[in-house]
Amino acid sequence: MKHILSKSSYIRSLQCLKSLYFYKFHYKDRDPISAEQQAKFDRGHQYGKITHQLFPGGIDVSPPTPFEYATSAKQTQALLLKQQPVIYEAAFIANEVVVALDILVRKGGLLHAFEVKSTTAIHPAILNDAALQYFVITNAGYGLEDFSIIHLRPDYKDLPADDIGALFVTESVKEYCVSQQQFVEDNILSAKEIIRNKKMPVKEQGEHCNSPYPCDFKNICNKSNSYASGSLFG
């Protein structure tokens, strides 16, 4: 089971295909991650672990490194065959795309997917993330009874930190995911075309460079705009 796209690279491609190109072929030239951005990453990982308490007793199939998701996907498949009730970081590969779902729960024989976010609301990038995961999981051959986002309540800071159930809200986004499947498939094809052609897209910098996330290739992008396509960065 091979893959050339992940959740992060797919979301990146929606923001800017040129950023995807740099991510794949000039990764070492990334801008340094800011302390603020690193804190967001760490906070998201922390809340992902905390929400395991909402579905205890699961098996974590996180890979030792980001290069071993194929092993995680095989472990996930084996656990599903054994009817494992809860799986953390369940991995799936389909259409050369890999996704890792925060929590997969079997209820009455039906699979329920949960993705955890450290935000207090569901924004478009989260919905795009969910739609991609739904696409990959179902195309890997698994039906999903529901797909939900678990996120912090807006007033979570006023609540007891040890009351995990009260801190979070769970919202189903399955209907949205189903409605976006053609959109997802089309954008997977566009992203894979960039990767296979290995040709830098022509794209000027603009507002999209910071929405929904600050691009981490601004410096090399600035340099690339000073050269004709196909010379230094082709």
Image (cartoon, grey):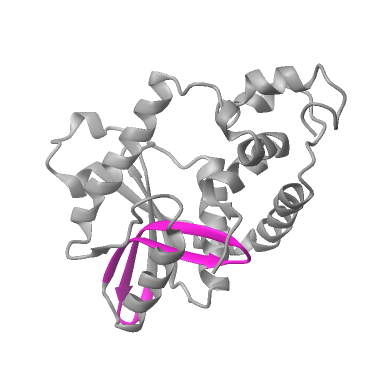
Question: In this picture, is 180 found above or below 139?
Answer: above
Q: Residue at x 12, y 41 (%)?
A: 162
Q: In this image, 99 relative to 9: left or right?
A: left
Q: In this image, 43 relative to 197: left or right?
A: left
Q: Residue at x 38, y 50 (%)?
A: 65
Q: Quadrant of the C terminus?
A: top right
Q: Does residue 105 belong to the magenta stretch?
A: yes
Question: In this picture, is 125 found above or below 73?
Answer: above
Q: Residue at x 63, y 61 (%)?
A: 179
Q: In this image, 209 relative to 34: left or right?
A: right
Q: Is residue 215 visible?
A: no
Across and down, in percent, residue 160 comes to: 13, 36
Q: Nearer the viewer, residue 106 or 99?
A: 99
Q: Nearer the viewer, residue 112 or 38?
A: 38
Question: In this picture, is 225 found above or below 25?
Answer: above
Across and down, in percent, residue 88 comes to: 30, 60
Q: Residue at x 72, y 17 (%)?
A: 222
Question: Range of the magenta residues?
Answer: 86-111
Q: Could you say which quadrant of the image residue 203 lies in?
A: top right
Across and down, in percent, residue 150 comes to: 35, 50
Q: Is residue 200 visible?
A: yes
Q: Does residue 10 belong to the magenta stretch?
A: no
Q: Quadrant of the N terminus?
A: bottom right
Chief secondary structure of the magenta portion: strand
